[in-house]
Image: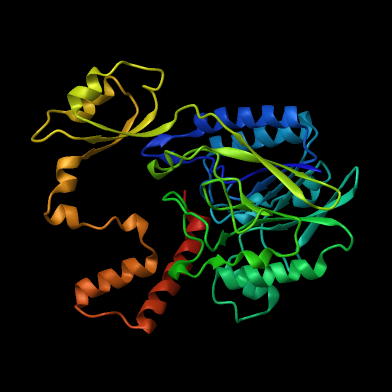
Amino acid sequence: MRIIHTADWHLGRIFYGVRLIQDQAYALDQFINLVREAKPDAVVIAGDVYDRAVPPPEAVSLLDETLSRLVIDLRTRVILIAGNHDSPERLGFGTRLLSQSGLHVAGRVGLDPVWTTIPDAHGTVSFCTIPYAEPALVRERLGNPDLPDHAAAMRAVIAKARETRPRGTRSVLVAHALVIGSEESESERPLSVGGTGAVEPSVFDGFSFVALGHLHRPQRAGNDRIHYSGSLLQYSFSEAAHIKSVNLVELDAAGRCHLERIPLTPRHAVRCVTGTLEALLSAPAGNDADDYLSVTLLDKGPVFDPIGRLRSKYPNVLELKRMERLGRGDQAASRVDYRSLSDREIFTSFFQTVKGEAASEDEINAYLGVVERLHALERESQP
């Protein structure tokens, strides 16, 4: 069984004010060509297809075109799940009808996990799809009020999947989750407030291969059977060193898997550069002048119109920082980058600053409950 595993396309993403739809179309053209050459038995897309619950029209058109080329033109089975950025209802519309054409979509978590069986030369492989398991929804569907967070919800749903797994077949689990010990990036939205969303790798015991979405760095998650494919593109400057790729997985007759990462070449690479303004402007112009750049200037003292002068040579300078200011021992240097903090850490820091005392667990939990409800509303109402 040959499988191509991808995830986290985030169609419709805006990066420092730049709409990435053309960059995403460029990468997906490469992906289509890879599928054409590799001739997989199935393509697996493990969530966060869109960047937000209500995607822009051009993102919907790009997904429609890409899936049509895969399913209709290349006659490839596609198994797709919703991630925490997607609207499960919108993504899951027409599931029964689409499955007859070879497109299997899992939007919301159901009472019983959905299994899709695909034959190969050695028998059959059963694919189980577990979309983003929103705790409130899983509590309702399973009738279990004792599932306080995403990690507990995932454990309950996977236990249900293990119970319903077809006997005597190799099995592939497709899920959207955070596994303990995996490396996160700046561009991922937390799955659960309060830092309690990660699951142990042992939760996935018993499956031949686990195709995961959510984390944007391609990586193994605990053992050789559990892998993230990573995102389609670099979606933050913290990912500048990431080589974006898709996973080509081969399952043998015994369920052993061999994985190869196939790199994707971006239309515009994401890079971080450092130097004085004069050095950067006098450097030879190369083929990478159109890359998306984060520039850190080493100049001391005032510099006239640095962003305008840099963009005359590097049109896609998206971020500008001054090393002189970063190195000062003043208030600016002591500021915290709140993008790297959890909701709990942001609240406790704010509470301590305003009240002059530590927040109690009841106060923290009340705040986190409100944030969790707001995240749920945001997935449905964000334009």
Q: Which quarter of the figure has residue 269?
A: top left
Q: Is residue 305 above or below residue 182?
A: above
Q: Residue furthest left?
A: 301
Relative to 320, 151 lies left or right: right
Residue 78 place in picture, x, y as percent: 74, 43
Relative to 143, 366 lies left or right: left
Q: How is the image coloured?
A: rainbow
Going 60% across and 45% down the picture, which residue do you hit?
A: 229
Labels in figure, total = 0
Q: Nearer the viewer, residue 162 or 105?
A: 162
Residue 116 place in picture, x, y as percent: 81, 53
Relative to 383, 9 lies left or right: right
Going 35% across and 55% down the picture, which residue do you hit?
A: 339
Residue 199 place in picture, x, y as percent: 58, 67
Going 68% across and 63% down the picture, which residue do you hit?
A: 204
Q: Quadrant location of the N terminus? A: top right
Q: Is residue 286 above or below residue 251?
A: above
Residue 138 place in picture, x, y as percent: 64, 71
